[in-house]
Amino acid sequence: MNKGEFEKIPEIFDNKFDLKMLYPIRNTFHVTEFSGFTSVMCAYYCSIGERDAAQLLFDSLKELTPGSAMVNYAKRFLHPSLITKLIRWVYKKRHEQINKLETQEKNEEHDCSLEA
């Protein structure tokens, strides 16, 4: 998330954005499971522009574990400082460049195989 690779979150969690969906057999979760998962989902929703969903998650996280490290982690995404915004922008641009180069390399390999 800090590197701007938020598009990996749906794959990591098998497109399940709720603990109950992720673990359908379970009915109870430890507070650390809830806070860890919720903080990541809050950061994810912030990263994709779903601020309302992120705010709801943040509010529940803050209510259950006020002052915890997970609240602070989520808060950095919901209310980032200027330096945090700059760092994320740099990571995002770097990630975009890497993806662009990988795509170009694949296209060049494909073109070379067609010529052969």
Image (tube, rainbow, N blue to C red):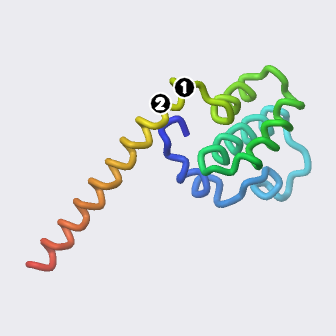
64 left or right of 1 in image: right
Q: Front-most of 113 and 47?
A: 47
Residue 91 vertical placement versus 15 (above, below) = above
* Residue type, numbered disc 2: Leu
Question: Residue at 25% across / 64% down in the picture?
Answer: 106
- Residue position for label 1: 82
Dot 1: what SS? helix
* Residue type, numbered disc 1: Leu
- Residue position for label 2: 86
Q: Where's residue 36, x and y in %?
A: 72, 36
Q: Where residue 46 is drawn, which disc sits there?
A: none
CB under 8 Å between discs 1 and 2: yes
Count how many numbered circles sit on residues in the image.
Answer: 2
Q: Where's residue 51, x and y in %?
A: 71, 46
Q: Quadrant of the N terminus?
A: top right
Dot 1: few (<14), some (14–19), or many (≥20) neighbours within 10 Å? few
Question: Residue at 35% across / 53% down in the picture?
Answer: 99
Residue 110 vertical placement versus 102 (above, below) = below
Q: Where's residue 67, x and y in %?
A: 80, 20
Where residue 28 sits, quadrant-wise, is top right
Q: Quadrant of the C terminus?
A: bottom left
Dot 2: what SS? helix
22 left or right of 29 in image: left
Question: Residue at 77% across / 22% down in the picture?
Answer: 68
What is the C-alpha distance between the residues marked 1 and 2?
6 Å
Residue 49 vertical placement versus 59 (above, below) = below
Give the residue at the far left of this rendering.
116
Give the residue at the far front of this rendering.
82
Q: Where's residue 40, x and y in %?
A: 67, 40
